[in-house]
Image (cartoon, rainbow, N blue to C red):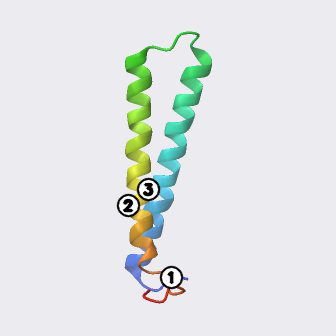
């Protein structure tokens, strides 16, 4: 349930962050599948990209939880 414009904006940001995370996972998968011996530096950078995307997504998720009216303190 959308309860405010801020909630809607957060939801849209979360959706975008989820898409970015999925793209990062796909990039890791594509690279490791296409490369017999992956370069450690490239793999590390791709994984860092995933970690950053996940961190952003989880921060937005935690903000969205504040709007959860089903929680006793929501």
Find disc 2 in the rendering and name its residue: 59
- Above or below: residue 4 compared with residue 29: below
Q: Position of residue 74 (x, y in %)?
A: 44, 86
Disc 2/disc 1 C-alpha distance (Å): 19 Å
Instruction: Determine crowd level at label 1: few under 14, some 14-19, many 20+ residues with C-alpha closer than 10 A.
Output: few
Q: Position of residue 56 (x, y in %)?
A: 38, 54
Image point (47%, 69%), residue name: 11
Find disc 1 in the rendering and name its residue: 2
In which quadrant will I find the N terminus?
bottom right
Query: Which quadrant of the view contains residue 42?
Result: top left
Q: Are marks 3 and 2 in contact (CB under 8 Å)?
A: yes
Instruction: Determine crowd level at label 2: few under 14, some 14-19, many 20+ residues with C-alpha closer than 10 A.
Output: few
Q: Residue furthest bottom?
A: 72
| Residue 12, label in figure | none
Instruction: Determine crowd level at label 3: few under 14, some 14-19, many 20+ residues with C-alpha closer than 10 A.
Output: many
Q: Position of residue 30 (x, y in %)?
A: 58, 26
Q: Are marks 2 and 1 in contact (CB under 8 Å)?
A: no
Quick one: 73 or 60, which is closer to the camera? Answer: 73
Q: Position of residue 38 (x, y in %)?
A: 50, 14
Image point (44%, 14%), residue name: 39
Find disc 3 in the rendering and name its residue: 57
Quick one: 60 or 74, which is closer to the camera? Answer: 74
SS assignment at label 3: helix
SS assignment at label 1: loop
Query: Which quadrant of the view contains residue 35?
Result: top right
Disc 3/disc 2 C-alpha distance (Å): 5 Å
- Looking at the rendered image, the disc whose residue lies closer to the viewer, 1 or 3, is 3
Disc 1/disc 3 C-alpha distance (Å): 19 Å
* Horizontal arrangement in the rendering, residue 54 relative to residue 26 (left or right): left
């Amino acid at each position: 349930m959308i309860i405010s414009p801020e909630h809607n904006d957060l939801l849209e940001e979360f959706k975008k962050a989820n898409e970015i995370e999925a793209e990062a996972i796909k990039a890791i998968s594509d690279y490791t599948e296409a490369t017999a011996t992956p370069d450690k530096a490239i793999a590390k950078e791709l994984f860092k990209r995933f970690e950053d995307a996940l961190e952003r997504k989880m921060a937005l998720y935690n903000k969205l939880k504040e709007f959860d009216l089903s929680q006793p303190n929501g």
